Amino acid sequence: MSDELSAALGELRRLLDHDLFPLAIGDVAADRRALKELTGQLDDYLLPRLAAIDAPLLAVVGGSTGAGKSTLVNSLAEQDVTEAGVLRPTTLAPTLVANPGDESWFLATHVLPGLPRVTGRWRGEPGTLKVVTTENVPAGLALLDAPDIDSVVTANRELAAQLLAAADLWLFVTTAARYADEVPWAFLRTARERSTALGVILQRVPRDALGPVRGDLARLLEENGLGGTPLFVVPELDLPSESTRLPPSAVQPVKDWLAELSADARARAEVVRRTLSGALDSLGVRLPALADAVERQRHAATELRVLARKSYDTGMAAFDEGMLDGTLLRGEVLARWQDFIGTGDLMRALESRIGRLRDRVVAAVRGRPATGRELATALESGVESLIRAVADGSAERAVEAWLATPAGRDLLERSGVRTAGRLGRASPELRGRAEIAVREWQGYVLELVRTEGADRRGTARAASFGVNGLGLMLMLAVFASTGGLTGIEIGIAGGTTVLSQKVLEAVFGDQAVRRLTERARADLRRRVRELFDEEESRFTVLLDGLTDTDPDALRAAARAVHERRLELPEASTGEAR
């Protein structure tokens, strides 16, 4: 049955093997810390301990700065195996002291696989685990001297927490001057919550205060749910130096307790099962909280996607307005239109009957292919300019919207100033893509005219205007509005669109013209939307893959572990290893 528990833990570890918190949302630092602690405990303790329930016990010696942890370890080992002194931090690399018979187990990366092993008399380097053997440590139990839990070095504090999470047994060291400090009690409450086997060593107690201090610490242990914890008191001793080992009599009660524990297979098995069960039970609280934090990440990513989409939706609305407000019929387009139909006196002609003017247009269109190309080019240039201007505005809005949120601001900052600056305007590739899109749209409009002309009895009339001429007039009809124009421009643009409309209606009929115009306009909008979607993807690609972990999958993995948490294998009751 333990195989199923191991499989459930393995699946959980797989789900956690990602950066679950890439976005700055909520207390993301605490969420990342919780993830690191959880994966560390799975790797350093739960998975290896479950795989080898009879392996030697690991007792981690932890505590505050200057509590005398290294001195205690040296005293228990009856030799200087770890460095003690007045300089802080003293323990730069953790030292594990084991019986020679257990050396092979601890040299292999069964426990704390992320720490390379070193042996010998030289000092361990930060980031390594120094392994020392001595016959003075009983078989079946190892002592690990951890860095200070309140070290001024962040990496040391984190390593201390990691080592304590990997322990079967905590030997928590404090002093008469610091036993009530909050930092140690935060760790002790964690031990209580995870049912970690625990022993407390109270050192440097003035002899005249042994009773009161011991009683007060026992009271605090009881109040914090740790009543019955083995408590050992070491009186204040006049030692010649900080590095001097304690006299054997001062640590004998601790030594005897550890020796009895290592010699009693049942007691060792009870320690393992208690700590292992407590760690498994703690997952029932820690994992749902982690899943909730992952869900917040997914919501934040969705919000950023929505903000980017809204920015480009606003841009699409601006493009629609630009299509219909008459601005595309200004300047160059107006000039090329007049050249195209050969009506320098267009304003006077507009006062005449539309039929007479239409006849003039027919003659003009058939005879001016070059000016038709110029008109098409002017239209193409105008539409492209509108696309680029709107894309610039959309990019700027998207960056501003992201910067207004903690998650977006953090994501842009981590992307780098150069990337964020580029995101604030349209991409350099947009110009080329817009040119292609507009030319293809013009081709589509010409094909619409060709198909419609071929399908009607008015084919001859359509032919008299030519596909290109009718296509140009249909393009003008797409932008048929005079909003935003003033003075003489209204008259010219109005005449332009009215004239184009009348010519098209004479060839295809009014209903067909409305249908053709709607189709041409819809096709242009579709192409522009595709361009904007590509521009928008520059933002959303920053989110791709960031929040793929499913919080429900985490919750399901937590339930699977919870349902199997009692399926622990039975420990052997034979001799200690």
Image (tube, grey):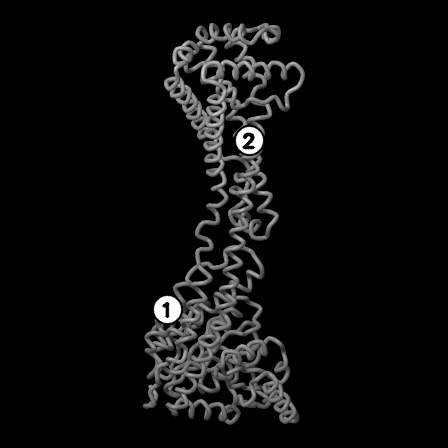
Residue drawn 55% across the image and 60% down it:
28
Q: Nearer the viewer, residue 479 or 306?
A: 479
Residue drawn 52% across the image and 65% down it:
33
> For the residues carrying marks 2 and 1, which lies nearer the camera in this image?
2
Q: Position of residue 576 (x, y in %)?
A: 34, 88
Q: Amino acid at mark 2?
A: Phe
**Residue where numbered disc 1 is placed:** 10
**Residue 509 disc label:** none
In this view of the protein, can residue 81 be seen by the observer?
no
Within 10 Å of disc 2 (Cα), the crowding (few <14, some 14-19, many 20+) is many
Give residue 54's quadrant in the image.
Answer: bottom left
**Element type at marker 2?**
helix
Give residue 444's quadrant in the image.
Answer: top left
Q: Position of residue 205 (x, y in %)?
A: 61, 88
In this view of the protein, can residue 554 be seen by the observer?
yes
**Element type at marker 1?**
helix
Q: Amino acid at mark 1?
A: Gly
Q: Position of residue 481 (x, y in %)?
A: 58, 22
Q: Quadrant of the N terminus?
A: bottom left
24 relative to 97, above or below: above
Residue drawn 51% across the image and 74% down it:
147
Measure how far apart labels 2 and 1 are at the Cα level: 53 Å
Residue drawn 47% across the image and 77% down it:
281
Q: Nearer the viewer, residue 220 or 78?
A: 220
Q: Nearer the viewer, residue 117 or 361?
A: 361
Q: Quadrant of the C terminus?
A: bottom left
Q: Position of residue 479 (x, y in %)?
A: 54, 23
199 relative to 106, above or below: below
Within 10 Å of disc 1 (Cα), the crowding (few <14, some 14-19, many 20+) is some
**Residue where numbered disc 2 is placed:** 319
Task: Judge from the rendering whether residue 179 lies leftward or rightward of residue 199; answer left or right.
Answer: right
Q: Earlier in the sequence, mark 2 or mark 1?
A: 1
